[in-house]
Amino acid sequence: MKQSPLFVLSFIICISLLCACGSGRSDTDQTLTQADSIALSVGKQAIRGLQKFSINDKQGNTLVSFDLGEAEYVIRFRDRVLMGQRKTGKTTYLDNNGDLLIIAKIRPDKIKLLSGTEEFRWQAKIKDQKVKISKDPEGANPFEIKQQDPNHYFIYFEGRELGKTKYKERIIDVDGIGTDLKIPATNNSFAFGLLLLRDIPEVERYILMAELLGMGI
């Protein structure tokens, strides 16, 4: 049946209005704001698969930031920039000068960090709600981050508790020896436990954080 011009025009207007309403949704999650009373803050922004995390001190100075994309990771801290080029099972990190710095080999149960000349540096083994982090190729004397439940993680070394992270009411409380940090966030992660492991050099520590965050654990 042939429709009248008025019917066709009305149909087009309805479709246009529906499209306009759907386009009002932003691709960007609201960035978490920093409170003056916290010692550390994390801002998170998701844009079409890209996650941005910035970790700031109480004065608002950025300590480290993470841009986690599908093809590239970027980590910034102090005056350094690490560029991670991602492929299946591997992220290759370059330094400020474009020189190969760290190779991260990724499996569902393991993250292994190698130097640019493929010498072993650090590794994280993931199993049974815990992550064991060691600078020994055989995994000896590891730091352990144990998940008690999705909101509570405990950090150990040689059976001694070093601290814990606890999520409640959109805040992660990172509590350890000489450390008491509060982080606005939407969920806890093994990655936040690394903030207490200062014996791990910053480069390797932040790369392990990025990889764990990228794995969504």
Image (cartoon, grey):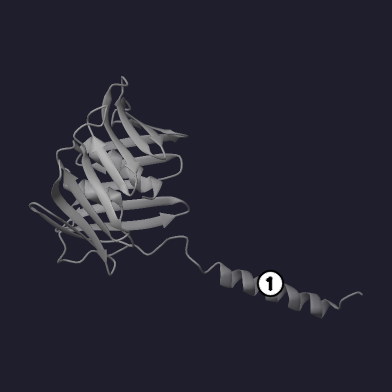
Residue depicted at 23% across the width and 49% down the height: 193
Residue depicted at 14% across the width and 38% down the height: 199
Q: In what quadrant of the picture does the N terminus appear?
A: bottom right
Residue 80 in view of the camera: no
Q: Secondary structure at mark 1?
A: helix
Q: Quadrant of residue 28?
A: bottom left
Toward the right, the furthest residue is 1
- What percent of the width, then of the height, locates residue 205? 24, 40
How many discs mark residues in the rendered view?
1
Q: Quadrant of residue 103?
A: top left
Q: Is residue 140 left or right of residue 149?
A: left
Q: Nearer the viewer, residue 71 or 111?
A: 111
- What percent of the width, then of the height, locates residue 168? 26, 67
Crowd rating for badge 1 (residues with CA inside 10 Å; few <14, some 14–19, many 20+): few
Residue 178 in view of the camera: yes
Residue depicted at 70% across the width and 75% down the height: 13
- What percent of the width, then of the height, locates residue 212? 34, 45
Give the labeled residue for mark 1.
15
Toward the top, the furthest residue is 117
At label 1, which amino acid type do we have? Ile
Q: Is residue 208 left or right of residue 109?
A: left
Rendered position, 91 above or below 117? below
Q: Nearer the viewer, residue 190 or 91?
A: 190
Rendered position, 135 above or below 39? above
Q: Is residue 89 left or right of residue 137?
A: right
Residue depicted at 86% across the width and 78% down the height: 4
Rendered position, 42 above or below 121? below
